[in-house]
Image: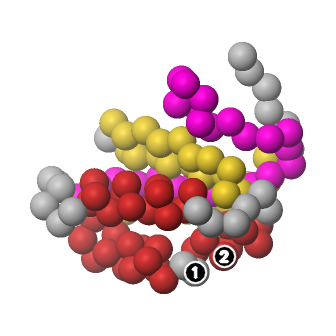
Amino acid sequence: MTPDGIAATPTPPYVAVIFTSLRTAGDDDGYAAAAADMDALAARQPGYLGVESAREGVGITVSYWQDEESARAWKQVAEHVEAQRRGRVDWYVAYRVRIADVVREYGT
């Protein structure tokens, strides 16, 4: 992660997992703690490259992975499977996951 909060990704290609969501009201069920736990757990997975997240109305989290196999493996980690279940039941009104191949990047 760079000092400005933008993920320090390598030269493409790599994979982006884009998670967009609409939350339920409040944080009564430990959402913030679970999200922090998932960020820390993801960072320890093979092939993890970084994450960026923003929320104002619609939440968007983009995690970056070395390849599709690494992203797929993260989806199957037991603690992440449980967080996904909790999200469907308790935390999200709606969500969408998109998987993309990053072929080019640029910026300052």
Q: Mark 2 = which residue?
A: 73
The image shows residue 81, relative to residue 74, as above or below, that is below
Under circle 2, the secondary element is helix
Residue 107 is labelled as: none
Under circle 1, the secondary element is loop
Q: From the viewer's perspective, is 98 left or right of 90?
A: right
Estimate the x, y position of residue 30 in percent, counting from the top left.
21, 63
Q: Quadrant of the N terminus?
A: top right
Indicate the amino acid at tag 1.
Gln
The image shows residue 94, relative to residue 62, as above or below, that is below
Magenta residues, start to end:
1-24
User: What residue lies at 32% left-to-right and 63% top-to-bottom?
Assistant: 34
Badge 2: few (under 14), some or many (20 or more) residues near its Cα, within 10 Å? few
- Can residue 95 be spotted in the picture? no
Decide whether residue 4 is among the magenta residues.
yes
User: What residue lies at 74% left-to-right and 21% top-to-bottom?
Assistant: 107
Q: Quadrant of the C terminus?
A: top right
Residue 76 is labelled as: 1
Asked if disc 1 and disc 2 are in contact, CB closer than 8 Å, the reply is yes
